[in-house]
Image (cartoon, rainbow, N blue to C red):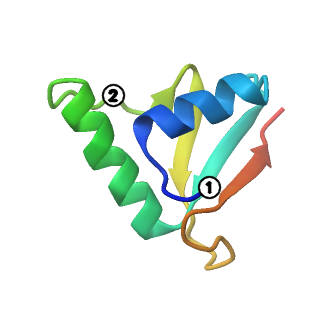
Amino acid sequence: MEKITYDAMRNFIIDNELTDSVAISLHPDSFDDLVMDYLDANGLLLQRPFEILGIEIVQDGTGNVTKNSVNLLDIA
């Protein structure tokens, strides 16, 4: 993904037909950018856990996810 935005993430979820059996892990910088874009789009309201279209979005703590890439985690 060129840049991870709220709209781009929604489109990624829809295009890949993701279900709640996965979570998305993002690089900490990409996660922060997405959260800020989400807050702008939703009037500064953030739900916990952070979800878009029912898919949980988490910040990578392993250092394995590169910036502007998406890692799918199987949570089923």
Nearest the viewer among 67 and 46 is 67
Residue found at x 58% / y 20%: 54
Graded by Cα atoms within 10 Å as few (under 14), some (14 to 19) or many (20 or more), the crowding at tag 2 reads: few
Residue found at x 39% / y 48%: 34
Picture quarter containing residue 68?
A: bottom right
- Tell how many labels: 2
Circles 2 and 1 in contact, beta carbons < 8 Å: no
Earlier along the polypeptide chain: callout 2 or callout 1?
Answer: 1
Helix, strand or loop at label 1? It is loop
The amino acid on which the numbered mark 1 sits, given as a three-letter code, is: Met
Left or right relative to 40: residue 47? right
Instruction: Report the quarter where the C terminus lies.
Output: top right
In the rendered view, tell whether residue 55 sits above or below residue 27: above
List the residue tagged with mark 1: 1
Residue 69 drawn at (x, y percent): 64, 62
Camera-nearest label, 2 or 1:
1
Residue 24 drawn at (x, y percent): 64, 46
Of all residues, the one furthest to the bottom in this rendering is 63
List the residue tagged with mark 2: 47
Residue 22 drawn at (x, y percent): 75, 36
Of all residues, the one furthest to the front in this rendering is 2
In the rendered view, tell whether residue 12 sits above or below residue 29: above
Residue found at x 55% / y 71%: 67
Residue 51 drawn at (x, y percent): 49, 30
Residue 20 in view (yes/no): no
Per the model, the C-alpha gap separating discs 2 and 1 is: 24 Å
Graded by Cα atoms within 10 Å as few (under 14), some (14 to 19) or many (20 or more), the crowding at tag 1 reads: few
The amino acid on which the numbered mark 2 sits, given as a three-letter code, is: Gln
Nearest the viewer among 58 and 12 is 12
Residue 54 in view (yes/no): yes
Instruction: Report the quarter where the N terminus lies.
Output: bottom right
Numbered tag placed on residue 45 in the rendering: none
